[in-house]
Each structure stands twice: as C-alpha cells, then as structure tokens.
Image: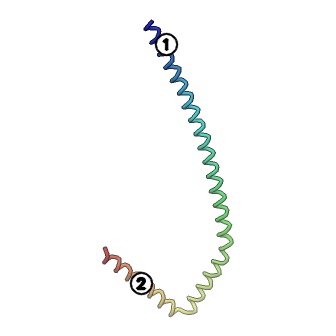
Amino acid sequence: MALFSRHQSSLDLHKEIGALRKEVAALGKAASRQGSSAYRDTRDQASDLYAELAERVSEALPVIRRRAHDFEETIRANPTRTVAVVGLVALTVAAAAILGSRRR
C-alpha cells in the first residue's frame, strides 16, 4: 500500500509540474504579446512625435534663416561692436573658468 501511495504522489507531482509548465508557457506568450503591443504603441507614438517635431522645425526654419541673415548683416554693419562683444564674452568665459577653478 505504501508503494502505491508513493507512486500516486509521484504521478500527482508530475501532473502538477506539467500543469505549471503549461501555465508558465501561457504566461510567457501573454507577456510576449503585451511586450509586442507596447513596442508597437511606443513606436507609433515616437513616429507621431517625430512627424510633429519635423513639421514644427520646417515651419520655424524660414524665421531662423531670416534672423541669421539679419544677425549677419548687423555684424557686417558694425565690425567694431562685434569685436567688442566677442572680446567681452571671451573675458567673461575666462573669468568664470578662473573663478570656478579657484573654488575647487
């Protein structure tokens, strides 16, 4: 009788292991489907964001070009002021670097 109960316990254990394997496989498939779905959703959102960004940049590009041209014209019209401003910026950066190195 004891032999039969051990044999029965062993069969029950094998059945439970088999059921658990099936359940793990089903969970793996479900996780894979959800992962694929999340990937597609994220890809679609990134694509939409890129399209919107490209549209905004293309709309802003003429304004940026115009302002760059105006800036270039201002520099050409005022070379002395340009040199003074660039020099002042260079001095500011140098002073910030020196002060920053002293604090360390």
The residue to which callout 2 is attached is 92
Residue in the image at 66% along x and 73% along y: 60
Residue 8 position in % (x across, y down): 49, 13
Label 2: how many residues lie within 10 Å, few (<14), some (14-19) or many (20+)?
Answer: few
Residue 88, by quadrant, is bottom left
* Image quarter of the C terminus: bottom left
* Image quarter of the N terminus: top left
Dot 1: what SS? helix
The residue to which callout 1 is attached is 8
Q: Does 20 sit above or below residue 61?
A: above
User: Which residue is farthest top?
Assistant: 1
Nearer the observer, disc 1 or disc 2? 1
Dot 2: what SS? helix
Q: Of 37 and 3, which appears nearest the observer?
A: 3
Q: Earlier in the sequence, mark 1 or mark 2?
A: 1
Estimate the spatial distance between the alpha carbons at disc 1 and disc 2, rounded to whole Å. Answer: 86 Å
Q: Amino acid at mark 1?
A: Gln
